[in-house]
Image (cartoon, grey):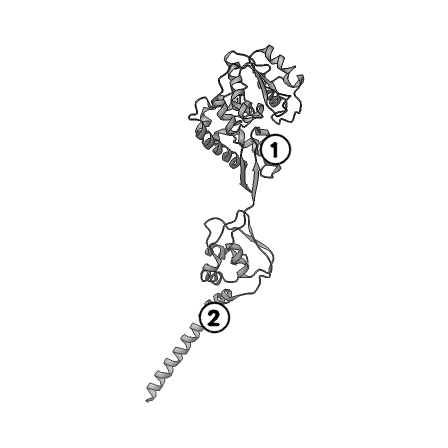
Amino acid sequence: MTKTERKKKTKMFRTAVIVLLIALAIFIWKVVPVLNEYFSDEPYNGKTVSIIVQQGDNINIIAERLEKKGVIDNKTGFIYKYKMNVEDYGPIQYFEEPVYIEKGMTNHDILKMLTTIKPVSMVKVVIPEGFSVDMIALRMSNHGLCSVDEFIEAVNDAEQYDYEFIKYIPDGNYKYKLEGFLFPNTYIFEEGITAREIVNEMLKTFEEEYELSVNSYENIFEIITIASMVEREAKISEERPTISGVIRNRLDIDMLLQIDATAVYAKSDGLYDIENVNAETVAVESPYNTYKYIGLPPGPICNPGISAVKAAANPESHSYLYYHTDTSKNDGSHIFTETYEQHVGTMQ
């Protein structure tokens, strides 16, 4: 080997060493931090910090936020830890509230938290047939779903709901436009639901049930108004068509309906918390009071069930104009009569 060849070989060796050193430096500078983060089991040792994880955020966005907050040292290593083990972790979830990273959490803990579906708390609410808007609002409040004011506000904004039957509700002097159309049912609501979403679900259920039972929206407001009175008056299901027939008969001859429930609705401001109906109750000054004003009240006085709706849409054909509770049976049934004299006579 000549001197020139030895120099050339030495130069090549030095160049290779330099390249190797540079590569090693780059590896140490770039790759080692990635590997350290990837394999790190060191717990986070800083103060509690929060990050926002919104729908559509991916692991790259989240890792960048964690790095900026000082939770992790290398976002690339964190990203690779997730992507190489995605089958174990599952998809990234999004959260309505900020996610908190606390002292002592490892990268594994953080990824488990970010990919764990948060259990949803559900609330069961039973809305009985005959509940008014005000009674429903109070029950929703008692279940912690919304305040009374929030529910009433959602009910009052009827135009925000897209249901065909709402177009058939005329303008009027009623207390609530949607009174009568919040279908009584057992509902399962998710915690955090809004009052508007609650009202919407009740209106949706009404639409489904009504369309199954009544063929058309023609006269729907009158049907639901009568159904609401039938619901509050009838204690026995079989009597609902009969009571509906009494109401129709009185309307046909412009006779005062004299439905106790209408006066109670007005007197109790829709809460029906009056135990005994007396002279003071039926004397209340209100367009809802059918002891004072001929015809139907301005609108429904409660939210009736489907049995009362069917009875209102299909009243029994008879000649009865009067009815009263059958105190001898004490089962909520009524005695029906055609004349006032018969009515008084059966009460003695």
- Residue type for callout 1: Leu
Q: Nearer the viewer, residue 59 or 212?
A: 212
- CA separation in Å, label 1 and label 2: 66 Å
Q: Is residue 105 left or right of residue 30?
A: right
Q: Residue at x 32, y 89 (%)?
A: 2
Q: Secondary structure at mark 1?
A: helix
Which residue in the structure is indicated by mark 1? 138
Which image quarter: residue 128?
A: top right
Coordinates of residue 19 in the picture (x, y in percent):
40, 75
Taking the spot 65% from the left edge, 19% from the top edge, the residue there is 281
**On-image quarter of the C terminus:** top right
Residue that lies at the very extreme toward the top in this rendered image: 341
User: Taking the image as drawn, is residue 346 in sight?
Assistant: yes
Residue nearest the observer in this picture, 2 or 301: 301
User: Looking at the rendering, in which quadrant would you find the N terminus?
Assistant: bottom left
In the image, residue 21 sits, relative to residue 107, either above or below, namely below
Q: Earlier along the polypeptide chain: callout 1 or callout 2?
A: 2
Q: Which residue is mark 2?
A: 28
Q: Is residue 193 visible?
A: no
Tell me whether the residue at label 1 lies in contact with that at label 2, contact meaning CB atoms closer than 8 angstroms. Answer: no
Q: What is the count of numbered marks?
A: 2
Q: Nearer the viewer, residue 14 or 107?
A: 107
Q: Residues within 10 Å of mark 1 (few under 14, many from 20)?
A: some
Would you call the spot at circle 2 few (<14 residues within 10 Å), some (14-19), or many (20 or more)? Answer: few
Q: Which mark is residue 59?
A: none
Expressed as whole percent of the image width and height from the top left, the position of residue 326 reads: 62, 20
- What is the x, y in percent for residue 327? 64, 21
Front-most of residues 114 and 72: 114
Task: From the top left corner, tell me how far across and down residue 314 is, in percent.
Answer: 47, 22
Classify residue 279 as left or right of residue 244: right
Labels 1, 2: front one: 1
User: Which three-letter amino acid code belongs to the residue tagged 2?
Assistant: Ile
